Image (cartoon, rainbow, N blue to C red):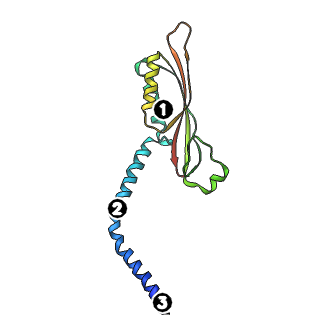
């Protein structure tokens, strides 16, 4: 019985020590939380969810029209969503076994945007550089570049991009 009481006292002393150290750890936890919130804000600014679709379309059209490029078509596909997994990639389809055990509280929302323009070689290159420099979360699915009309120095660019966002279901 003495050993049980002594063991219980040692446990209580350990809990008391941990409880007395907790306030000193609070500042570190608050700093870590602030840093994570800043990282989250940077990532949220790069997402393209429902609230940013009109802005994305306007940006693509204005970027394409600069320097005289002609916009032939801009199609914004509807959003699709799938469960987001731990250590997932937006380009992969998750397997059935990973869906259950690695599930996060988020869905990956993706939207395909198709853009078709005509312009000179330099104009097309400038547009591609602008789209590449844009920090939104995206992946190029198709880049099709071909000559325009016969005898013309114009090129036609058909571009299909997937834009991403993490959303709560």
As helix, strand or loop, the secondary structure at mark 1 comes to: helix
Corner quadrant of residue 100: bottom right
Q: Position of residue 120 (x, y in %)?
A: 46, 15
87 or 66: nearer the viewer: 87
| Mark 2 → mark 1, Cα distance in angstroms | 42 Å
Name the residue: 43% across, 27% down: 129
| Sooner in the amino-acid sequence: mark 2 or mark 1 | 2
Residue at the spot of label 1 = 57
Mark 2 vs mark 1, foreground winner is: 2
Q: Residue furthest right?
A: 96
- Relative placement, left or right, of 97 versus 108 is right
Name the residue: 46% across, 39% down: 52
Q: Residues within 10 Å of mark 1 (few under 14, many from 20)?
A: some
Corner quadrant of residue 18: bottom left
Residue at the spot of label 3 = 3
- The total number of labels drawn is 3
| Sooner in the amino-acid sequence: mark 3 or mark 1 | 3
Q: Is residue 20 above or below residue 100?
A: below
84 or 64: nearer the viewer: 84
| Sooner in the amino-acid sequence: mark 3 or mark 2 | 3
Name the residue: 34% across, 61% down: 28
Badge number at residue 151: none
| Mark 3 → mark 2, Cα distance in angstroms | 38 Å
Q: Residues within 10 Å of mark 2 (few under 14, many from 20)?
A: few
Q: Residue furthest top?
A: 151
Residue at the spot of label 2 = 28
Discs 2, 1 touching: Cβ within 8 Å = no
């Amino acid at each position: 019985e003495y050993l049980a009481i002594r063991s219980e006292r040692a446990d209580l002393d350990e809990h008391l020590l941990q409880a007395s150290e907790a306030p000193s750890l609070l500042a570190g936890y608050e700093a870590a939380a602030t840093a994570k919130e800043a990282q989250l804000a940077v990532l949220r600014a790069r997402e393209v969810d429902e609230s940013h679709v009109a802005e994305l379309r306007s940006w693509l059209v204005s970027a394409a029209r600069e320097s005289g490029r002609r916009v032939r078509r801009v199609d914004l596909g509807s959003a699709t969503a799938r469960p987001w997994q731990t250590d997932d990639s937006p380009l992969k389809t998750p397997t059935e076994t990973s869906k259950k055990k690695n599930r996060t509280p988020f869905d990956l929302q993706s939207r395909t945007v198709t853009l078709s323009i005509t312009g000179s070689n330099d104009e097309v290159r400038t547009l591609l550089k602008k789209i590449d420099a844009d920090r939104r979360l995206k992946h190029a699915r198709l880049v099709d570049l071909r000559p325009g009309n016969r005898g013309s120095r114009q090129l036609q660019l058909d571009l299909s991009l997937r834009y991403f966002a993490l959303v709560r279901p």
